[in-house]
């Protein structure tokens, strides 16, 4: 085996230098204590950092080192799909306290449990601790050797280094890294062994130079914008060791892999500091982050902290998301807890620059019919520039595959979060709205800085300032506004939310104006008297086969593309914005604004019927202009047809609602035993081409459908309540759909250990991205929704 050949791919692209790049000063102070620290590098199996740009980064790496090939191939750092993990993720996670992640690492024959707890106090955002325990899996030999590295790096200005004298043979006893920055003050990171660890013993003469019954420690100097590359840095250390061993012992008498895959003892200088442990069998060690101004943290205290964090998570979970009948079994609860925890434990902090094409090239106006033919699938791409670095605090759709912020995904992520921790949800909403540029645009996909870009092929990196994405964050703003009138929150919590909504309001308005201006439809072409208002919209950024900005990438639309198209989902999203702005303006007593937004909403409701209802197809549809310049409806029944209903824009006694319910209920169209399909089975494009949004079941849309059915079924008192027959149909659909969705997601989770991006409408199997813990987590909310058994009289008797 050629070791150097094995190591090469990892070493490419990383030149460790001692050059100090220019560094920017840290901005802002350590915010809110309980949210300063977290596993905010969700792309890693475990990486803690503060919500501060260019500050401290930490991360964990490990591998089974019984053979060279495995150590090389299964060396864990970033989350990856299909890499021999038998499931991993947070089983419990409370955003303000911490939680427990369990990693079933089949490839390395070890299960890791990581308990992370925050310990608030002091003036620098508090302390935290992590206990990392390894338990051999069933197929592991009793003397399995596992190597683990914990690293801490400083991306910006600050001190960081080992608090020890240089020691040739590693450090025995606890190891301490000391650091200090303007925001964090002084701190120590201490690594403390558990009581029962077994260490390797001498089997090879190289032991005399490097015994492994100690802790190895090495400092590295990395370019500040490369400090995130923990694995490459570790491998650059291993390479030095391996080169030396090769030279001395040759291939034939080579040292065992656990001796070879080691960093060297050299703890002077540098901005990246690694600590390595080599264990035989089960093991345990603690990482204690002690803020000098904060409370003391010891391993003994950690025992209690772990227990109380777990207890408080369980009890709070019962309060907020107790699964309701018929989902009250242990499996349901375990699945629900894991879904919420993965969503919350997947929240990350990102900082960096964004690639944007700000050429405003005229063809981007998409007003020329020939544009799409010429452009085919590719846009005319001009040189992108980078917008200045920004920060973003957000959850992510999938830690292994899309570990970054996506605008419309985030509104869905925050639906469970807003019930768990309204303050956190608002902090995330603010973080997103702070990204808005001067025009009112927010980029759909936030690929901030080199670490985020390392996961994205070049052709997907650039953002365009005329592309939108559904405004699901308004769902959260609406939910927060509603909470102000509820009994769930204390008066100080309400005051806090209200004052922050007041601050947010101008940004919401600006974003709304941007939408209405840049995504306006060419409604002039519709020469009907009824269309007196301009409420008709068209997504920019379409290609013949995709409208990525809509979020429903390959859902069938008008063919060929036409500048006169009007998109039903888009006018519905704008309706959502008008409605939530009217709610908030009302709350803030901005009377003129209330009038404006109500007027818009009324016009939108009217145009939904006038521009988008097809009496022939008995469905709401996209519209376009035909060859004779006539208004024509484009009906591909599926999620798009349901938008006015999903967003609850139709009065419940609206004449078109029964047809919508029939479409949902029809097994030859949208209904499946596992949830509502994206496209009707009868559509000619059902299941064709990429088949991404052309049949599979998506949880975000299904959540909106379940919720709309519930709202319809339970509205018995409003002036526009539906007739009894409609309510009964909605009730039955609600109850059956809720069961179908939950049963299938729980089954797939039990079978595979993962949540999935989408589910197959024929088999129910999870498919596409594995460990998609984003909007699939909405199943937690669905489980906790009201049980409305069929034939029940609960609401009839009111
Ligand atoms: C491509 C591939 C290593 C597609 O969940 C995020 C989005 C949704 O917003 C959207 O509605 N997903 C849905 O249709 C995933 C998009 C991933 C794009 C990145 C690069 C990475 O290759």
Image (cartoon, helix red, strand yellow):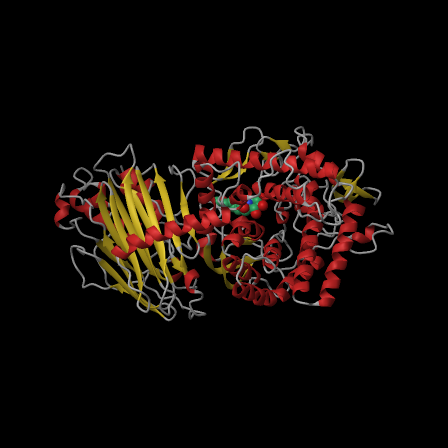
Residue 633, horizontal then vertical, whole percent: 78, 41
The picture quadrant where one finds residue 253 is top left
Q: How many marks?
A: 0
Q: Along the line of sight, which residue is nearer the eye, 125 or 722?
A: 722
Q: With respect to residue 658, does 356 lie above or below?
A: below
Q: Where, quadrant-wise, is the N terminus in this rendering?
A: top left
Residue 198, horizontal then vertical, whole percent: 19, 44
Please give the name of the residue rendered at 30% of the width and 51% of the height, measured from the top-left corner. Answer: 131
Please give the name of the residue rendered at 41% of the width and 46% of the height, measured from the top-left corner. Answer: 90
Please state if 69 lies on the left or on the right of 331 as rendered: left
Residue 387, horizontal then vertical, whole percent: 54, 62
Please state if 360 lies on the left or on the right of 154 as rendered: right
Q: Where, quadrant-wise, is the C terminus in this rendering?
A: top right
Q: With respect to residue 741, does 474 lie above or below?
A: below
Residue 629, horizontal then vertical, whole percent: 83, 45
Q: Along the line of sight, which residue is nearer the eye, 734 or 365?
A: 734
């Amino acid at each position: 085996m050629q070791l150097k050949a094995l190591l090469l791919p990892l070493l490419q692209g990383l030149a460790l230098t001692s050059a100090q790049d220019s560094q920017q000063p840290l901005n802002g102070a350590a915010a809110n204590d309980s949210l300063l620290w977290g596993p905010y590098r969700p792309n890693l199996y475990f990486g803690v950092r503060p919500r501060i740009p260019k500050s401290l980064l930490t991360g964990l790496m490990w591998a089974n080192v019984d053979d060279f090939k495995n150590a090389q191939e299964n060396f864990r750092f970033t989350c990856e799909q299909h890499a021999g993990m038998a499931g991993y993720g947070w089983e419990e996670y409370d955003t303000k306290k911490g939680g427990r992640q369990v990693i079933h690492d089949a490839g390395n024959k070890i299960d890791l449990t990581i308990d992370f707890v925050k310990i608030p106090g002091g003036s620098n955002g508090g302390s935290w601790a992590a206990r990392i325990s390894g338990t051999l899996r069933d197929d592991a030999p009793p003397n399995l050797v596992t190597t683990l590295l914990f690293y801490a790096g400083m991306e910006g200005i600050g001190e960081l280094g080992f608090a020890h004298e240089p020691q040739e043979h590693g450090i025995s006893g606890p190891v301490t890294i000391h650091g200090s920055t303007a925001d964090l003050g002084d701190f120590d990171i201490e690594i403390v062994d558990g009581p029962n660890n077994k260490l390797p013993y001498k089997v090879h003469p190289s032991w005399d130079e490097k015994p492994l019954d100690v802790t190895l420690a090495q400092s590295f100097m990395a370019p500040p914008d490369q400090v995130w590359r923990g694995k490459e840095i570790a491998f650059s250390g291993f390479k030095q060791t391996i080169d030396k061993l090769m030279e001395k012992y040759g291939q034939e008498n080579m040292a065992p892999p656990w001796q070879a895959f080691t960093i060297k003892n050299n703890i002077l200088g540098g901005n990246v500091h690694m600590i390595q442990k080599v264990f035989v069998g089960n093991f345990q060690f603690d990482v204690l982050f002690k803020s000098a101004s904060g409370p003391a943290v010891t391993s003994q205290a950690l025992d209690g902290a772990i227990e109380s964090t777990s207890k408080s998570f369980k009890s709070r979970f019962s309060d907020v998301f107790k699964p309701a009948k018929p989902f009250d079994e242990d499996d349901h609860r375990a699945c629900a807890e894991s879904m919420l925890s993965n969503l919350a434990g997947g929240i990350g902090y990102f900082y960096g620059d964004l690639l944007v094409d700000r050429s405003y090239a005229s063809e981007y106006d998409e007003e020329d019919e020939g544009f799409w033919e010429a452009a085919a699938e590719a846009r005319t791409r001009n040189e992108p520039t980078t917008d200045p670095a920004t920060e973003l605090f957000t959850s992510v759709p999938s830690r292994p595959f899309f570990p970054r912020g996506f605008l419309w995904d985030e509104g869905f992520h925050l639906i469970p979060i807003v019930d768990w921790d309204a303050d956190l949800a608002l902090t995330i909403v603010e973080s997103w709205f702070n990204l808005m540029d001067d025009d009112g645009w927010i980029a759909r996909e936030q690929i901030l800085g080199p670490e985020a870009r390392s996961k994205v092929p070049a052709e997907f990196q650039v953002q365009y300032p005329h592309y939108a994405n559904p405004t699901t964050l308004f769902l959260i703003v609406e939910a927060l506004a509603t909470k102000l009138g509820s009994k769930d929150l204390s008066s100080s919590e309400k005051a806090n939310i209200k004052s922050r909504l007041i601050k947010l309001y101008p940004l919401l308005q600006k974003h709304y104006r941007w939408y209405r201006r840049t995504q306006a439809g060419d409604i002039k072409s519709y020469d009907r008297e009824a269309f007196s208002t301009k409420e008709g919209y068209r997504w920019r950024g379409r290609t013949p086969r995709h409208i990525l900005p809509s979020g429903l990438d390959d859902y069938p639309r008008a063919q060929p593309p036409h500048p006169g198209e009007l998109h039903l989902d888009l006018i519905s999203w704008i309706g959502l914005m008008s409605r939530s702005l009217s709610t908030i303006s009302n709350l803030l007593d901005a009377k003129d604004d209330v009038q404006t937004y109500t007027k818009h909403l009324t016009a939108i409701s009217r145009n939904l019927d006038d521009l988008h209802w097809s009496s022939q197809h008995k469905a709401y549809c996209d519209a376009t202009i035909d060859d004779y310049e006539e208004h024509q409806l484009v009906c591909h029944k599926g999620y798009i047809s349901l938008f006015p209903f999903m967003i609850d824009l139709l009065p419940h006694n609206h004449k078109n609602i029964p047809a919508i319910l029939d479409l949902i209920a029809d097994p030859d169209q949208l209904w499946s035993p596992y949830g509502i399909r994206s496209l009707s089975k009868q559509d000619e494009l059902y299941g064709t081409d990429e088949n991404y949004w052309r049949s599979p079941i998506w949880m975000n849309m299904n959540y909106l459908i379940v919720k709309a059915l519930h709202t319809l079924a339970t509205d018995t008192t409003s002036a526009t309540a539906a007739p009894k027959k409609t309510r009964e149909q909605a009730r039955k659909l609600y109850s059956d759909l809720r069961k179908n969705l939950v049963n299938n997601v729980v089954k797939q989770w039990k079978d595979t250990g993962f949540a999935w991006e989408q589910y197959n409408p024929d088999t129910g199997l999870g498919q596409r991205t594995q460990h998609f813990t984003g909007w699939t987590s909405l199943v937690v909310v669905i489980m906790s929704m009201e049980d409305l058994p069929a034939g029940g009289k609960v609401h009839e008797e009111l």
